[in-house]
Amino acid sequence: MSEPFSLASAGRALDGALSRLVHGLVTPPQQSAEDRAAAIHEYRLAREQTISIILDLTQAQADFKSEPDVWSISQNVEHLLLTEDLYRAQIQKMIALAKTGGATDIELTFRDINTSVAYIPREIMPLLTVPLKVFNMFVPQAVRETMFRVPLIPAINPSVSDPAHSQPIAELLHRCTSSLAATEAVFRGDLPTNLGTVTLTHPILGTNNIVQIFGIITAHEQRHHGQMNRVLQNPRFPR
């Protein structure tokens, strides 16, 4: 029996059609292995800056909070590491998809990455999926990275990257190095030649290939450098 007409089914059909249209319009150009290596290098430089910020901190300094609702440096760092874990897993899925052939895009929803912006509650964001997809059709990659790098728009991180109240700073320092090594290890060995055609799509992130994903997470790490430096500059920061 065919499904009776409803606003819900019409909405799903419209969303599916729009998804295909948006993907066709905004699919990034293919990227070479050299482009990928350069993007990973830029990410490594950002991580080295993170390490330099926390290298000589005491535990009291790492856990200092300038305000109750402002993350400490240790929380900023753990958030960066959890974010890297999240995108490393997605990149591994992209590599696996390239190996199997066929589909070339992984489409994520707010159920997969429940981020939000500008004080909009996470539970409201799925209702904005369609307008966000349309918005991303007109946002150049450079602008998208700037939005992640410069904190002009307040952001709510995904639940999966919520940091704990405190983590040993020595452990975080070790994880900064080991996590980066794990990410770089993903690209060792033989990679599928069509990897540059595979993309990851999310209503807020838009449609990005691996090079562009590294551009976003590099900008994100640099954004948190600013947050950590503001904590360091606070007059009450432990000396």
Image: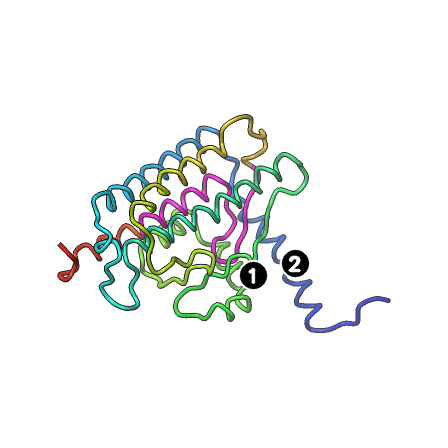
Residue at 21% of width from left, 48% of height from top? 57
Residue at 31% of width from left, 58% of height from top? 151
Which x, y percent locates residue 234?
Answer: 17, 60
Magenta stretch: includes residue 114: no
Residue at 62% of width from left, 42% of height from top? 104
Q: What amino acid type should be assigned to the residue bearing mark 2?
A: Gly
Circles 1 and 2, Cβ within 8 Å, touching? The answer is no
Q: Is residue 199 above or below residue 116?
A: above
Image quadrant in which the C terminus is located: bottom left
In the picture of the structure, the residue carrying the numbered disc 1 is 111
Q: How is the image coloured?
A: rainbow
Which SS class for mark 2? helix
Q: Is residue 73 left or right of residue 194?
A: left
Q: What amino acid type should be assigned to the residue bearing mark 1?
A: Arg
In the picture of the structure, the residue carrying the numbered disc 2 is 16
Q: Residue furthest right?
A: 1
